[in-house]
Image (cartoon, rainbow, N blue to C red):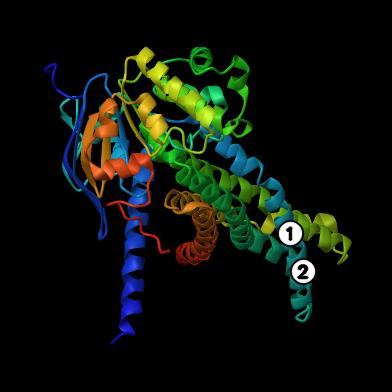
Amino acid sequence: MSQSQPKISLENVHKAFGRKVVLDGLSLDVGVGESVVVIGGSGTGKSVMLKCILGLLHADSGSILVDGEQVIGSNTETRERINHKFGMLFQGGALFDSLPVWENVSFGLLAEKRVNRDEAKELAISKLAQVGLVAEVADLSPSELSGGMQKRVGLARAIAADPEVIFFDEPTTGLDPIMADVINDLIVKTTREVGATALSITHDMASARKIADRVAMLYEGKIIWAGPVADIDHSGNEYVDQFINGRAEGPIQMAVRA
Amino acid sequence: MNFLQPIGRMLLTFLATAGRLTLFTADAVSHVFRPPFYLRILGRQMIDIGYYSLPVVGLTAIFAGMVLALQSFTGFSRFSAEGAVANVVVLSITRELGPVLAGLMVAGRIGASLAAEIGTMRVTEQIDALTTLSTNPMKYMVAPRLVAGVVMFPFLVLVADIIGVFGGYLVAVHRLGFNGANYLQQTYDFLAAEDVNSGLVKAAVFGFIVTLMGCYHGYHSRGGAQGVGTATTNAVVSASILILCFDYVLTEMFFTK
């Protein structure tokens, strides 16, 4: 494996649901240890892109490589091996209601029988501490937690198995600005501690500026601009300008009637 | 020719659903026999399906037995054949009413709860989370529930049989003036192992149907709270119809033997 090989490489990826084309030749590289944030409006296909990489959806055509290994059309064993490298923070947390917090955090390790239940609880408590939660939270049910705490538990679960790649799906959606900033800080801190590559999707520009090394903008199923986060304010792309400044006027027309 | 369009659409939808259900069933059953096995979840489901359904099944069975004794007495007294009440009660309960009533009641309780639970997991991305945590959702969620259904339904029906016959006994002895010892002796003499066994086989099939429908509709639910509600309704309705349908098929099989 060469040093320059990207951790994740998407090339000309297409995905449609019936007649609705969502990804229309999407190409994007994410380097090893890099944090890339994909921005774009609602319904532009950001979540579909993530789900195609995770194998939750099957891309219609194109190529998705993880460490040079093809994801599209891979068999179950390959898929499971690739998924072992991943951690994922879902938009709504996606915590399992039927399990206490500590079992949620160490679920992956328990499922693979890599640890026994005592070790799993100990590990969960240490991961909870990493995201700023006290040990008492471990025995609570997810429904007893606030939205911000659920996000933190979701983050603890995402990093529990020390993954090589962590995906963040709208990590700050639904949080107040202060809690959103706390989560952003935790994402930066934990990703560095684990030494992971990060791929995030968001439409929260404050979040994107904080956690990204590089930003890519998705529009109509394609990446229309990608560059270092420092360049985003002078990208020279009118679509990016309109999006990051949150203007109603511009080339991006929302499908709403006045 | 426009009237043909909805018919064609319905046929295609039916065939697509039948195909999806067949693939889902084959996938789920294959995971029952392939490790890893989630015994903790299996145990929890067996308690939920078996133990916590006992009050519902017990109440249904006792009243069914009581009504059956009264009605059969009313009917048979017209032919001076009141003595056949015990025979009719035990035969009807063990062969038919025990499995069918227990199946329908548990379809309402367990089928709805499975569809709502799995449907909520689907719309809140918990099923996607399972996949990203290297856990096959069919193996983790569906397979243990199917096994619990097939194992625990016969147990429930056995309890329903006993309570149903007891309900008939209560009415016959305390309301209709039968001699208790004679009634029990008549019940015991008339009852054949095949009557109970055929009911238990039906119960295992109904257990499979109820859990399969709950899991299938929950797993394929879409669109938030409304989608989960629809999945719950579909699970109960389809399980109830299939129970009555397979009840006839199985009765026919046992009848021709």
Q: Which mark is residue B83?
A: 2
Q: Which residue occupies 35% across, 50% down?
A: A43
Q: Is residue A99 visible?
A: no
Q: In the image, what residue type sits under mark 2?
A: Gly
Is residue B160 depicted above or below B73 in this figure? Answer: above
Q: Quadrant of the C terminus of chain A?
A: bottom left
Residue labelled with disc 1: B186
**Residue nearest the viewer, comparing A216 with B188:** A216
Residue A60 vertical placement versus A101 (above, below):
below
The label on residue A160 is none
Q: Is B16 on the left-hand or right-hand side of A170?
A: left
Q: Where is residue B209 shown, x and y percent of the image?
A: 48, 54
- Relative height, residue A252 to residue B100 (above, below): above
Q: Nearer the viewer, residue B236 or B151?
A: B236
Pointer 2 indicates a residue of which chain?
B
- Is the residue marked by circle 1 packed among few (<14), some (14-19), or many (20+) residues within 10 Å? some
Please rate how many residues cluster around mark 2, counting C-alpha atoms within 10 Å: few if below 14, some from 14 to 19, many from 20: some
- The earlier-in-sequence mark between 2 and 1 is 2
